[in-house]
Amino acid sequence: MARYTEVNERLREATRDKIVYAAIALFAEKGFAGTSIRDISEGAGVAVGLVYQHYKSKEEIHDAIVAEANAELKEFRKFSIEELANGAIEEMSKSIVFAQWVTIMPCLRDFILALEPQVGRQKAQYFMAKLKGLCAIQLALKDEFIVPTPEMLMAGVVKKKEDKK
């Protein structure tokens, strides 16, 4: 009986993930106001009723995305800006999901504040603007997008070691 419950929980989690990923993609493409529950259900490949089984409303889906983003932000604080740039470029090279997430990231201000102690506010804002811009370009170009190097993302944010002398 416990195994059956475990399998059901994994299926529920997989369905929630499909709903959230579909919502992220649609919010990035059409905006929050332009996206309906029906759009999300079609994007996730599930029935509308199943979406409502997991989330009461589109706002609750958005709140789940915000909560996940805030949880990830806490993890980001542990990394240097160089590690974040490397991770961002790696994620961009894997799929378009990262670009969609960054495009609708609700906690941009908090992310900048997390980076500020490392590089200063202006450079943190510059880094995030570059990252969001690259993600928007990736969404527009899709398969034609060429993922830049981490060094290109970091240009103008952190001086090279030889420049510090």
Image (spheres, rainbow, N blue to C red):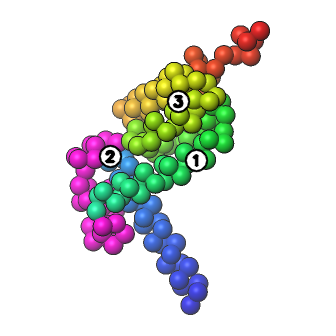
Name the residue nearer the viewer: 95 or 74.
Answer: 74
Residue 156 location in percent, x, y? 57, 16
Which residue is at the far bottom?
A: 1
**Would residue 70 be found to the left or right of residue 63 on screen?**
right
Span of residues in magenta: 27-56
Q: Please, what is the three-letter code of the amino acid marked with disc 3?
A: Val
Residue placed under numbered mark 1 in the picture = 74
Element under disc 1: helix
Q: Which mark is residue 147?
A: 3
Circles 1 and 3, Cβ within 8 Å, touching? The answer is no
Quadrant of the frame with the N terminus: bottom right
Q: Which mark is residue 27?
A: 2
Circles 2 and 3, Cβ within 8 Å, touching? The answer is no
**Would residue 159 be found to the left or right of residue 97 on screen?**
right
Instruction: Check if residue 53 falls in the magenta segment.
Output: yes
Q: Nearer the viewer, mark 1 or mark 3?
A: 1
Circles 1 and 2, Cβ within 8 Å, touching? The answer is no
Please tell me which of labels 1 and 2 falls first in the chain: 2
Q: CA distance from mark 1 to mark 3?
A: 26 Å
For the residue carrying disc 2, how many other residues have a C-alpha within 10 Å: few (<14), some (14-19), or many (20+)? many
Residue 22 quadrant:
bottom left
